[in-house]
Structures are given as C-alpha cells and as structure tokens.
Amino acid sequence: MRVGLIGLGAMGGPMAQHLAAAGLLSIVGNRSLQKVTDFVATHERIHGASGPQDFSNCDVVILNVSLDADVLQNVHALAEVLQPGSMVMDHSTVSVQTARDAAACLAGKGIAFVDAPVSGGVEGSRNGKLSVMVGAEADALERVMPLLNTYAARVTHMGEVGSGQATKAVNQIMVAGINEAVCEALALAEALQLDPAKLIPTLMSGAASNWFLDKRGVTMLNSQFTPGFKNAHMLKDLRIVQGMADSLGLNLPALRQAESDYAELAESRALPDADTSSLISLKRKNGDGGN
C-alpha cells in the first residue's frame, strides 16, 4: 500500500512518525514546505510532495488540516490526480456536510472517502493512543485499519460518512464543558489557597477525575499555556457544533458559554495559539489571569 499524508502539524506530525516507523508511509505534504523538508531529511525512504500531483500513485491519502475549506480544497485537488479504487481518509474536524460533500466529490471519480476525526490530543497522537470515530463503508474502514492501528488505541465504526464528524461534535461539547468546569473549580481552589500538590491527586482519585484535569491541571495553575490544543482550533470546532445545534433547534447553554469564552480568548485577547487551558485566565478573580 502506497500511503501519503498531508498535514504535518501537532496531530499529523506524530501520526506520520508512527506510519513511518511501521514502514507504511511513502510521501508527505504540508502547506509549509519546511516541515516537509525537515521530515524527509530524517526519513530517507519517504518523499516530499510539492503539490497534489505528487500523490497520484497513492492508494490512500490521509488528511490532517485545519478548516473545512482546507479539506475541500485538498479533496478537489486529489480527485483530479488519484486513481479509481484509491481512497482519502480525513482526520480533520469539520462539519457533517463537509464530510458528505468530500465523499460525493471523490465518489464521482471512483475514490472512497473515510470520515475519521480523532480525539486524544497531542499526547494521544504522540503516544499512538488516539480514539478514532469513523464514518465510512465497512470495506473502506477495513482497508485502512492497518494504518489506524499504528496511532489509535480505539477505532469505532459509527456508521456512514458524516457519522464520524457527528460523533466528534458530541465529543467537543463534552470536552468544552469539562474545560469550563475544571477551570472554574481550579480558579476557586486558587482563591481558597488550597495546595495544588494535594488537591489535584485528591480530585483525580474521585468522581471529579478527568483527562483535562490530569493533563492540564498543574500547568494551568502555573499559567503555562503551551499547546496542546489551541484556542483557535477549539473555537472553530465549537462554531461548527453550534451551527449543527441551531439547525436541529437545540438550545445548549453550556455550548454557547464555551463558544463565547473561546472567542474571548482567541479573538478579543489575541491568544489563538495558547492552549485551551488558558481558559482559567477568564475564571480567575477579575478575569485578569491572576495579575
């Protein structure tokens, strides 16, 4: 199987490393060509792509890009160069409609599409422990399982194309709600002058235990906000989810609060590239980040 990957960012870069270690990766591409150059320099049998045409011989191309428009741009370009019987697997977080539009575009050329957003953060990608939510035909999923097994701890077939992104929307509401609760709780803990060295292990041993507290509790209390998952990406995801909720006539106050808070961080406070745990800066007294 000749495999290509487009998008060597915080999530895609580690995925590419896992695929390369398993001998499954042939070619990589990225908007910033320097990342391609750096990756190829340390992987002698992997080629760098300068454009879509370089993926023409791939059996599978994996996408890890930021926006719906980026996914569709790549899909339309790949549809013109990939061979019938090949496939594209998308790990980006986009709308359900974008996933369906991508699948329809490729289907017209005899190319399969796998809608496969992931959860688990940068740590999950680095450690090969991602959870993958798949919307695809069963035979298409079966074909890409050897690839997914290099960086996923769990792969779940949720149904047809679009159901992967629908599952990711549910995931992001939960993630954002947990972030809100943890940041508010730790802002209260700071105001009460509780000892973090005792507090966090105690909370992690009970019903309040969660991934965000475990992975970000100590760093956020030290005002260290290196991503991780960027505020801008969270805001993008929440706006997608809010659009879905609106179309279904659902009133979801926790979602609205999280969207408002991440808009404040990413846009009003110009912190798009800070980790989502910087949310605690809005929850601290006077919302001043403790300054």
Image (spheres, helix red, strand yellow):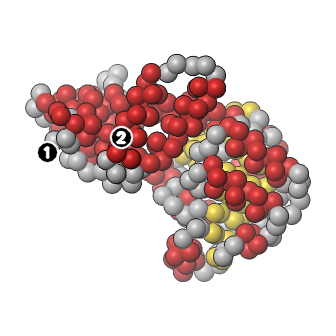
Residue occupying image coordinates x 88% and y 51%: 108
Q: Quadrant of the N terminus?
A: bottom right
Quadrant housing residue 246? top right
Q: Answer yes or no: is residue 96 visible.
A: yes
Q: Position of residue 277 (x, y in %)?
A: 33, 42
Name the amino acid type tagged 1: Asn
Asked which secondary structure carries label 1, the reply is loop
Residue occupying image coordinates x 56% and y 75%: 33
For discs 1 and 2, the disc positioned in front in the rendered view: 2
Give the residue at mark 1. 291
Would you call the spot at circle 2 few (<14 residues within 10 Å), some (14-19), or many (20 or more)?
A: some
Residue occupying image coordinates x 19% and y 28%: 188
Quadrant housing residue 284? top left
Q: Position of residue 214 (x, y in %)?
A: 33, 39
The reply, left or right, for residue 116 in relation to residue 128 is right
Q: Nearer the viewer, residue 1 or 115?
A: 115
Give the residue at mark 2. 264
43 shown above or below 70: below
Q: Position of residue 285 (x, y in %)?
A: 17, 33
Q: Nearer the viewer, residue 260 or 79?
A: 260
Name the amino acid type tagged 2: Glu
- In whole angstroms, how far apart are the C-alphas of marks 1 and 2? 18 Å
